[in-house]
Image (cartoon, rainbow, N blue to C red):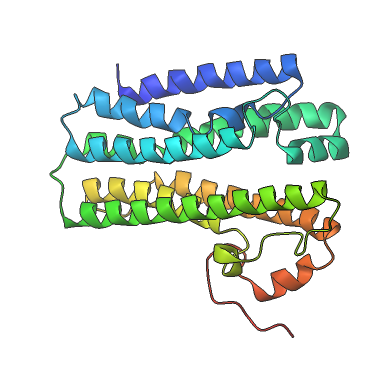
Amino acid sequence: MSPVIVCLWILAAICVVTWMLSLITKEYSWVDRIWSIVPVVYVWVYAVAAGLADARLDVMAALVTLWGARLTFNFARKGGYAPGGEDYRWALLRSRIGGWKWVSFNLFFIVIYQNVLLFLITLPAWTAFQNPAPLGVLDVVAVIAFLTFLIGETIADQQQWDFHRWKAAEQAAGRHPAPPFLRSGLFRYSRHPNFFFEIAQWWVIFFFGTIAAGSVLQWTVLGAVLLTLLFVGSTVFTESISRSRYPEYDGYRATTSAVVPWFPRRAD
């Protein structure tokens, strides 16, 4: 069976399972819980289908495995796999729309759209599978770029983790944390550096496919584009919450790049 068909069967099964779990548990973060796992499975399906004899596919699978391991660890330590570990944004959004609108949103966006997106971002492995070719200099550049972005995201997530632990300790001691949100380290140059590095890693995976095919004109760019748009939307929604909680957040927005790291601007 073609590896892309195998992945489509996995996609269909995961959609059914995550949808049923959301209905049974009334929690809606099941796709979040498999976000760092399913893409790893998809890419290894292509690598195994090639008999683990395609060096580029093996490298892609190894890199995506590193991505998945890091993201799974970070999600787990924040309690994402624990009962009641639902993303706070889903609860807030559910309180705003509710009823049949929420039921539809859960099925079509949270379950179907996001699972399809996880399938799409790994399709460059299908391109590589169809165009086996020896590794070259561009592959080395892509590996270095991926690992650089992986390290960047690891640092950003650690800085965020350390900040929230400090903030919780301050609140537990009856003190008011100042500042109330992270704006140092990598967050001095981007309000969401972890978003930037996450997106960048999947653009590198897309470029692995273009290297194999010998052309950047590949329709599989759709996955990277849609992932970018998803994070743009997430940025807007997340920041709307931050702005409602912290009056000083607008000042941070005025001086700091939204996603792509850049030098801070002067406040007016």
Residue found 53% across the figure and 65% down from its top: 260
Depth check: give the residue in front, 191 or 230.
191
- Please state if 217 lies on the left or on the right of 82 as rendered: left
Write down the quadrant of residue 85 in the picture. top right
Name the residue: 52% across, 67% down: 261
- The quarter of the rendered structure image containing the C terminus is bottom right
Q: Nearer the viewer, residue 104 or 81?
A: 81
Q: Is residue 226 above or below residue 253?
A: above
Q: Tell me, yes or no, if residue 158 can be seen here.
A: yes
Q: Nearer the viewer, residue 3 or 38?
A: 38
Q: Position of residue 172 (x, y in %)?
A: 81, 46
Measured along the vertical axis of the image, is residue 126 above or below residue 156? above
Residue 184 placement: quadrant: bottom right
Indicate the position of residue 241 as horizontal and vertical percent values. 79, 53
Query: How many marks overall?
Result: 0
Is 127 situated left or right of 180 in this image? left
Q: Residue at x 59, y 63 (%)?
A: 187
Q: Give above or below for 125 relative to 24.
A: below
Direction from residue 95 to residue 267 in the image, left or right: left
Q: Residue furthest front?
A: 173
Residue 233 image offset from top left, x and y in percent: 66, 51
Residue 125 versus residue 7 in the image, above or below: below
Question: Percent position (x, y) of residue 155?
Answer: 49, 54
Locate the N terminus by quadrant. Answer: top left
Viewer-closest of 12 and 246: 246
What residue do we see at 77% from left, 65% from top? 249
Residue 123 in sight here: no
Q: Residue most toward the left?
A: 134
